[in-house]
Image: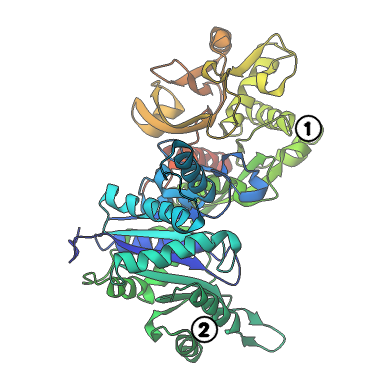
Amino acid sequence: MFENETKTTKYVFVTGGVASSLGKGIISASLARLLKGRGYSVTIQKLDPYINVDPGTLNPYEHGECYVTEDGAETDLDLGHYERFTAITTSQANNVTTGKIYQSVINKERRGDFLGKTVQVIPHITDEIKRRIVLLGKKGGYDVVITEIGGTVGDIESLPFIEAVRQLRYELGFGNTMVLHLTLVPYMKASGELKTKPTQHSVKQLLENGLQPDVLVLRSDVELGADLRRKVALFCNVSPNAVIESIDVPTIYEVPLKMQEQKLDEVVLEKLHLPCEGESDMVTWREFVEKVKNPKDVVNIALVGKYTELPDAYKSIVEAFVHAGAANDVKVKVQYINAEKVNAETADEILGGWDGILVAPGFGHRGIEGKITAVKYARENKVPFMGICLGMQCAVIEYARNVLGFADANSAEMETPTEHPVIDLMEEQKNVTDKGGTMRLGAYPCRIQRDSNLYEAYGQEMTYERHRHRYEFNSKFLADFEKAGMRATGVNPETGLVEAVEIADHPWYVGVQFHPEYKSTVKRPHPLFVGFVAASLKNRNK
């Protein structure tokens, strides 16, 4: 690790303009990866302008998946990108929402912390935002903190965050802070022209709020010429080498390499007055990207879920398949299958021919019977199967109904009268009424049985995995299941909670209560996904 000159943490603020969903999270993660490759200690923070305290209560159709950190925070999906790119473990401090800010300030006001003063956006809200930004750097002792501000410049919701950044630049010093602004350069097919005016207006909007960007990253469908970049630099008051293009690439994991080619990391280090010797070590990253772009084979996986119209609802699962595919030298093609369309009559047509079947996590009764049917198909037809969270619970219900003979078996979550609630509400959840942040969240230990797919994947008897659920395997029925052939191969050593189930007379059948996808990174592909993909490849070749 380098020692920076002033012994202080440096801050990079990433803003966006013109349109949302341009990839600020990917750019932030790419920059973090490049700086980490140079030996700097880095972390990334996401500031979300919405008033929800966290994304935990948001519908996945609204906001994509809810990512869970090691310490149990329900966060924005961009934190998944941060961890996958950098292998840095994030925490509750890495995701701050307007809801959290206002909740904190209002709690202070109720306690009398402001001594009767009128509480206002400036300075009280902006002070709390600044405190959260700086605290992350101080507590972690990082060389660089990259802070991404959600939304686009000009949004009413983002104004307090932009104002807080403006104040911080003066308070921390311009040599210790910088602003990277990501905008869109649209291509007009009718005239065959790239238009820079939206970028100019976006920068003007930023200037009206008191911020001058130091670096511009221009998102485009086509390559930007040197003349266009010089034009943008001239009109937006940035140096020509600080205008970086970000064009579409086959895989998001190629973005750091594109940023390195244009020396983004060098420009940033120069702006922050940090040493910049040699280049970032991206050798293993390049090897990974080559494997992703040039696979030796293809594996086809059916993902059965109920949010299949929006792929971002299963973002971490899809990326875990990319990592596991590279580890197996294959490309994993994921086909989203709406669970509501799967039933006894359609199962053969919809599920036939896939190399592996994954039943996805979720909540509520919609699509549950389709998921149970998909599990049955995978079990009876010996198709490699993985069930995650609710997917594991569906595997338990299916086995209870069709092997144990408990025809009415169900989960207590479905509120269907049953004498066999093989999935039941966790004891500590029975008196919980609030929805937000009240589930079993974060990392918990799991003891693994030998002679199991789990042990073959992990190669050890203990692991820690992240959870997000309220319901659990009802251990009252465990003896019935094990007698019939379904084993609990993963158990929490402290509570006895069943964490994983398998059946022996199947090529590869694993259901896990936890979410392995949250811990899969480029550097460390998750062993369960690696094992599942390997089993699916074996099934394909067979």
Compared with 247, 295 (above or below) is above
Nearest the viewer among 195 and 491 is: 195
Which quadrant of the structure image shows residue 352?
A: top right
User: As drawn, is 374 to the left or to the right of 519?
Assistant: right
Residue located beneath label 1 in the image: 343
How far across and down, in percent of the image, does residue 481 sit? 57, 12
Q: Nearer the viewer, residue 431 or 64?
A: 431
214 or 475: nearer the viewer? 214
Amino acid at circle 1: Asn
Q: Where the C terminus falls, by quadrant?
A: top right
Residue 134 in the image: x percent, y percent? Answer: 34, 54
Residue plotted at (45% across, 60% down): 148
Element under disc 1: loop
Quadrant in the picture for residue 393: top right
For mark 2, does the 10 Å Cα neighbourhood hold few (<14), some (14 to 19), or many (20 or more) residues? some
> Toward the viewer: 69 or 392?
69
Q: Quadrant of the N terminus?
A: bottom left
x then y, percent, for residue 365:
72, 29
Between marks 1 and 2 in the image, the one whose residue lies nearer the viewer: 2
Q: Which mark is residue 224?
A: 2
Classify residue 307 by image quadrant: top right
Task: Say how many tags the image has.
Answer: 2
**Residue 189 horizontal/vertical position (percent):** 69, 83
Work out which residue is located at the far front of the displayed protein and give it: 116
Q: Residues within 10 Å of mark 1 (few under 14, many from 20)?
A: some
Q: Residue at image x 21%, y 70%?
A: 275
Mark 2 falls on what kind of element? loop
Q: Identity of the amino acid at label 2?
A: Leu
